[in-house]
Image: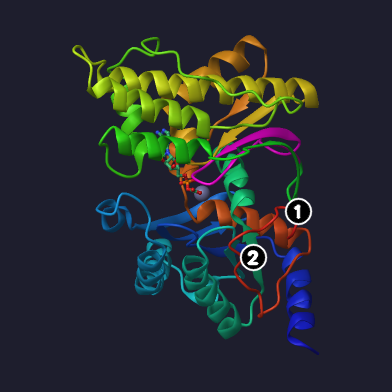
Amino acid sequence: MSYIERMRERARDLQQKETLRVLALESSCDDTACAIVENGRNVLTSCIHSQIMEHRRFGGVVPEIAARMHLESVDDVVDQALAEADLTLADIDAIAVTRGPGLVGALLAGLSCAKALAFARDIPLVGVHHIAGHISASYLARADWAPPFLALVVSGGHSHLGVVEGYDQVRWIGRTRDDSAGEAFDKVARVLDLPYPGGPQIDALAKEGDARAVRFPRARIAGAPLDFSFSGLKTAVIQFVEKNVQCQAPISRADIAASFQEAVVDVLSRHAMLAAKQSGMRRVAVVGGVACNSALRARMRRLTRSAGMDLCIPQPLWCTDNAAMIGCAGYYALRSGRVDNIDLNAAAVLDIAQP
Ligand code: KG4
Ligand code: ZN
């Protein structure tokens, strides 16, 4: 029997098991994360080694440094997760790992470790799409949350709207044409002299500013009302900052941060509500790092409440990159009978339709 046939058989046996424990790894960007998740939604432990301080002096993530740091911390983070859960590798039934999209060197560090663990223990390995992971954070947030629902996915690399039709199935109905919302936050933060990552910094600074101080542009794409474009907004803010510096009475950085954030929140929330209406979804999830944004959370709460819709925004810990969401997505992939071969490769670009 070949390796993959044996793993498929193992995965079939796991379907009968009452408690299925998945050890998950995530290393697509600047966090080396390991989590152990029981039956998809019960997070026994979630450990994260953040590299933010290393990348901060460069103003953004340096891929080569990220890959090397993942290699250095991946074993430690696995040991830490097992110790915190008071388990050994013998208690783990399957391994889940982010296989893309992301920085390929960074992904390979987590993927190689995951493959080694799965092979050594002779247990199934399942590759997870990073965005499927972010969507699964909503299952961690609420025990009753299940497809179908509309998802607004706003991370560092994605601004997407999709109808989640099943645990392993998303129909995308809107996407960004250029920068993601997270990229816009990070780039605008840089011109405001705020450290990386810019999103949380702008969020904090905006609380002291007036969101109506400057009316920044909201891009509309002809014929594609659910698509996003944030590069025009980003350029408008950068040009405004440059001109503003030369003024007699410059507008405060807090006002610029608040006005920029308002433009992003306005566009994201309007598109999400329109997408919900068009797709007939009464339940909406907002996930990904930008879902930590306090103004976006408040706006989505207000809009969905007045429309009588059910909203799920995971707690900030599950919005930014973590391995618990990968463990959850991996569990549902295994439950649907999906197992990967040991030659599974990392992919910098990966369509979510590809398992
Ligand atoms: O999902 P995530 O942790 O990583 C990726 O998959 O990219 O998202 C990171 C992004 C960064 O652009 C960061 O600036 C943004 O999420 N972010 C925020 C906030 N917290 C994180 N953006 C706006 N407001 C926040 N509070
Ligand atoms: Zn992410």
Q: Nearer the viewer, mark 2 or mark 1?
A: 1
**Type of the residue with mark 1:** Ala
Q: Between residue 141 and residue 13, name the one nearer to us.
A: 141
- The quarter of the picture where the C terminus appears is bottom right
Left or right of residue 209: residue 184: right
Residue 127, label in figure: 2
Instruction: Identify residue type, mark 2.
Output: Gly
Q: Quadrant of residue 261?
A: top left
SS at mark 2?
A: strand
The answer to whether 159 is drawn above or below residue 274 in the figure is below
Comparing 225 with 110, the one in front is 225
Query: Bounds of the magenta span?
Result: 144-164
Q: Closer to the N terminus: mark 2 or mark 1?
A: 2
Circle 1 residue: 353
7 left or right of 58? right
From this viewpoint, is residue 16 visible?
Answer: no
Pinpoint residue 199: horizontal percent, then vertical percent: 39, 36
| Dot 2 alpha-carbon crowd within 10 angstroms: few under 14, some 14 to 19, many 20 or more | many
Compared with residue 311, is residue 154 higher up or lower down, i.e. above or below?
A: below
Q: Residue at x 26, y 15 (%)?
A: 251
Q: Quadrant of the N terminus?
A: bottom right
* Secondary structure of residue under mark 1: loop
- Name the quadrant containing residue 277: top right
Q: Nearer the viewer, residue 69 or 340?
A: 69
